[in-house]
Amino acid sequence: MAKNKQPSQRQLRVGEALRHALSDVLERGNLRDPAFRNISITVTEVRASPDLKNATAFVMPLGGEAADAIVEALGRAAPFLRSAIAKQVELRHVPRLQFKVDRSFGQADHIDALLRQPQVARDLGENAGES
């Protein structure tokens, strides 16, 4: 199977349902781990595997502080989170959860900073006049 294959509609639907359920569980704050105390976690995306047995949740704590520690704590809480999600999502089997830091925020900031550089803005302005 090709690695570039786009996710199916079912994978996308399941991923979005899992994202909503996971966000809801994290918002309620029922996690006992001290790593979650006074921290707000954004779930930006959940990608389900083609067989729907595994899912990767991309998360970012508000402010981006201690992101790796939060991901580690979420990994420890994965069995609890999976059972909490099972109560909200109508699936025969809830996928095993894996967590990763969503690095897209940092990449977007980097690209924005590059585009704001004077030489890039000048070059973009010159190219705009050519069209």
Image (tube, rainbow, N blue to C red):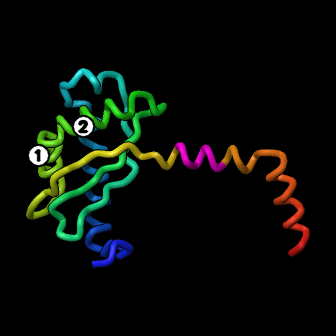
Whether residue 86 is situated above or below residue 75 in the rendered picture: below
Answer left or right for 3 relative to 51. Answer: right
In the picture of the structure, the residue carrying the numbered disc 1 is 83
Q: Residue at x 21, y 25 (%)?
A: 33
Counting from the top left corner in percent of width and height, residue 66 is at: 39, 28
Give amino acid for label 1.
Ser
Q: Is label 2 in a helix, a strand or a loop?
A: helix
Judged by depth in the image, the label closer to the viewer, 2 or 1, is: 2
> What quarter of the picture does the N terminus occupy?
bottom left
Reply yes or no: does residue 96 show up in magenta.
no
Counting from the top left corner in percent of width and height, residue 127 is at: 85, 66
**Comes first in the chain, label 2 or label 1:** 2
Q: Residue at x 32, y 55 (%)?
A: 46
Residue that lies at the very extreme toward the left in this rendered image:
92
> Residue 95: which quarter of the image?
bottom left
Pick the residue in front: 72 or 94.
72
Counting from the top left corner in percent of width and height, residue 86 is at: 13, 52
Give amino acid for label 2.
Leu
Pick the residue in front: 46 or 23.
46
In the picture of the structure, the residue carrying the numbered disc 2 is 74
Task: Kindly check if marks 2 and 1 are in contact, taking CB atoms under 8 A apart as contact.
Answer: no
Q: Which residues are magenta?
A: 106-111
Counting from the top left corner in percent of width and height, residue 113 is at: 69, 44
